[in-house]
Amino acid sequence: MSKSYDIVIIGGGPGGYNCAIRAGQLGLKTACIEMRETLGGTCLNVGCIPSKALLHSSELYEAANKDFGNYGIKVEGLGIDLPKMMDGKAEAVKGLTEGVAFLFKKNKVDHIRGKGRIAGKGKVEVDGPDGKQTLEAKNIVIATGSEVTPLPGVEIDEERIVSSTGALDLKEVPKKLVLIGAGVIGLELGSVWRRLGAEVTVIEYLDRILPGMDSEITKQAQRIFRKQGMTFELSRKVTGIDKSDNGLTVKTEAADGGKEKTFDADVALVCIGRRPYTEGLGLESVGIKTDERGFIPNDQFKTGAEGVWVVGDCTHGPMLAHKAEDEGVACAERIAGKAGHVNYGAIPGVVYTHPEIAAVGATEDELKQQGRKYKTGKFSFMANSRARANHETDGMVKLLADAETDELLGAHMIGKGVGEMIAELCLALEFRAASEDIARTSHPHPTMTEAIRQAAMGVEGWTMQA
Ligand code: FAD
Ligand code: NAI
């Protein structure tokens, strides 16, 4: 006899597992199907967590290698133990994926291993290590996430031509690494391997890095990354990669055609974006159609098919773990008859390079496009006491507020640790704070957060900057 549930979730990543745990908390009979061996999805297994583990250890190495001398600290016999670094990464992943499994048990969520497929209204087939079974579901939540966007003509082998998954697991530091795409993955994983000794060249189709982020901030970021040793080849497209025993030859031409140029590499990382993953999901059995880019459209997480919901990377919005989590929770609440809600205007984005880049709300470029009247407040970390004491003065805070009401519209930062600092501005946006609210809020001294307050004071022109 088939098992029946209030909710069957397909996919155990941040969207799926948060939806499952919240549904369990709300007393709904819940199952979550995951085809990987472990829960946690892309984020915990091959995304956010392993990349941040390597970013942290490689940042410590680079600081010891290049910066400690400036602080009067002598280092001798410094070296890299790559297998140990990878063990540290694996340990973090294991602890966290097991943590999700524990939370499933605690909240009475059934974890079902295998590939799930919708088989008509209220039915999900699972093909797993224990054979095939069919589950009955009052509600089905699609949380199948995303996969790497392939580059036509370039075949990923995860050894020499890698996606982020292979780049998180290289067995040695490449001498020359070519990144295809100057987005978040390229800059984060490029930073890891550059710090460990690779010569890194970034090939980007557009004439800028990190499209979508505030261009004043990204120009500053590019200058800093260049100073750190990354080479940028903007407005250039990859036309193919030749493989030989001696290495790779990455063939490129100018984005508008012609001007061919080749680059030698030991490893090439394809990171030109991710696309929704809905392969073999049986969407047609309930009449769901994806849009032209493969996303499943939704209205408050409801798909066009009755009783079928969608959250996370496989539907519209930023492909970020916390967006997927928020949607998972809100979706479970809606299914339980509550008023689950996500404020898409206050979802932060962080690039975990050094310095970090963090943003929430509208960019200045967007406000200009909308023809909206706004005021700007900026503060450089060069004038922040903690940044000076720590010799971490690269970067700035920029706040954008409505010219008439003073409501905060956007916050954009580059600097050491701004990925943590941005949460203050998410809260400000969530509560629809005015820039003056931030300017008049006490901030501890001496901290980097004072730069946020000073930028807010700058909106009304009373920054205390030397
Ligand atoms: P996923 O995490 O992709 O989970 C979907 C799960 O569904 C997968 O485990 C998959 O195996 C499973 N699945 C798919 N189809 C089926 C099926 N038919 N049956 C059963 N199971 C199925 N985001 C951040 O916010 N911060 C970061 O620092 C960050 N770093 C990243 C670094 C890298 C290298 C990458 C690749 C991504 C990173 N992201 C980061 C993005 C983040 O990982 C995703 O936004 C997030 O994982 C999306 O969650 P999800 O639940 O929608 O999908
Ligand atoms: P991305 O969308 O961030 O960047 C892709 C880059 O590749 C863009 O600059 C684009 O212009 C460029 N590009 C596209 N086609 C190209 C081509 N043919 N040749 C050269 N350049 C090309 O995608 P990325 O870096 O692959 O990351 C995927 C997603 O994963 C991100 O959008 C983000 O949602 C998520 N992510 C988030 C992280 C974080 O929050 N810190 C970290 C890593 C990933």
Image (cartoon, rainbow, N blue to C red):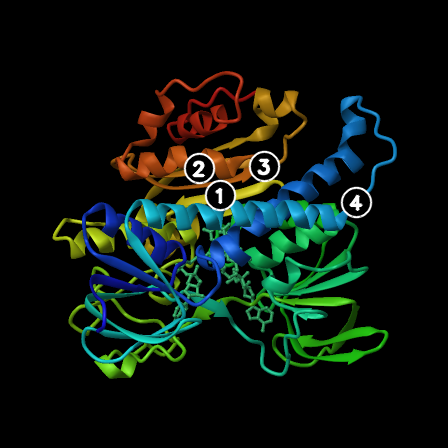
Disc marking residue 80: 4
Residue 120 shown left or right of residue 130 in the figure: left
Q: Earlier in the sequence, mark 4 or mark 3?
A: 4
Looking at the image, is 316 positioned above or below residue 28?
A: below
Judge whether 397 appears above or below 445 on screen: below
- Residue 114, image x and y in percent? 41, 70
* N-terminal-most mark, 4 or 2: 4
Question: What is the three-letter code of the residue carrying label 4?
Answer: Ile
Would residue 66 appear left or right of 113 to someone viewing this image? right
Question: Which residue in the protein does label 1 denote?
Answer: 358
Q: Residues within 10 Å of mark 3 (few under 14, many from 20)?
A: many
* Sequence-earlier tag: 4 or 1: 4
Q: Amino acid at mark 2?
A: Ile
- Which circle, 4 or 3, is nearer the viewer? 4
Marked residue nearer the N-terminal end (2 or 3): 3
Q: Nearer the viewer, residue 229 or 168?
A: 168
Circles 1, 2 touching at the beta carbon (< 8 Å): yes
- Secondary structure beneath disc 4? loop
